[in-house]
Amino acid sequence: MIRTFALASCVALTGCASNNLYQWGGYEEQLYAAYKDPTKVETLRLKLETLLQETQQSGRRVAPGLYAELGTVYLQSGNRPQAIRYYELERSTWPESTLLMSAMIQNLERLEKGTQGDKK
C-alpha cells in the first residue's frame, strides 16, 4: 500500500514537472529594474537583444511580447524605425497580436511621414 502511494506520488509529481516552453532570460527582473530606475533601460535593451538572438539561434520560438517590448524600448528612445521593425516581428511571430501591432505600426508610420513632411 505504501509502495503504491509512493509510486503514484512520484508519477503525479513527474507529470507536473514540465520544460519551459519559452526562454525568458531574466526578462521580468530586467523590466522591473528598468521601471524602477530609468537609467537601466539601456541594460534592458541589451539583455532583450541578446535573449532574442540566443533564442533565434537555438531554433526556439521567441516568447510572446518580447519583440514588442524591445520595440517599445526603441520607441521610448526615439528610434521609430527600429520600433516598427520589432512590432512587425511581433505581429508575424504572434498572429494574436495583429490588431494591436498593426495599430502601433500605422501610428508610427503616420508620425514618420509627418516628421519627413516637416523636413521638406
Image: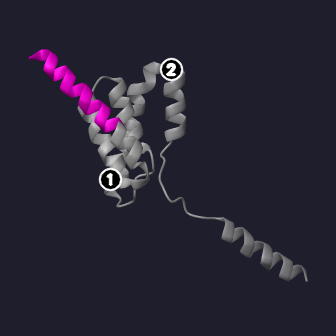
User: Which quadrant would residue 85 be assigned to in this image?
Assistant: top left
The front one of 13 and 93 is: 93
Q: Secondary structure at mark 1?
A: helix
- The magenta segment: 104-120
Say if mark 1 contacts mark 2, CB within 8 Å.
Answer: no
Residue under pointer 1? 92
The residue at the point 12 percent across, 16 percent down is 119
Quadrant of the drawing holding the N terminus: bottom right
Q: Nearer the viewer, mark 1 or mark 2?
A: 1
Q: Amino acid at mark 2?
A: Asp
The front one of 46 and 106 is: 106
Q: Is residue 4 magenta?
A: no
The front one of 22 and 111 is: 111
Q: Secondary structure at mark 2?
A: loop
The residue at the point 35 percent across, 36 percent down is 104
Between marks 1 and 2, how big is the CA–CA gap? 31 Å
Q: Amino acid at mark 1?
A: Ser
Q: Position of residue 82 (x, y in %)?
A: 26, 34
Residue under pointer 2? 37
Residues packed near mark 1 inside 10 Å, few (<14), some (14 to 19) or many (20 plus): few
The front one of 75 and 36 is: 75
Q: Position of residue 101 (x, y in %)?
A: 37, 42
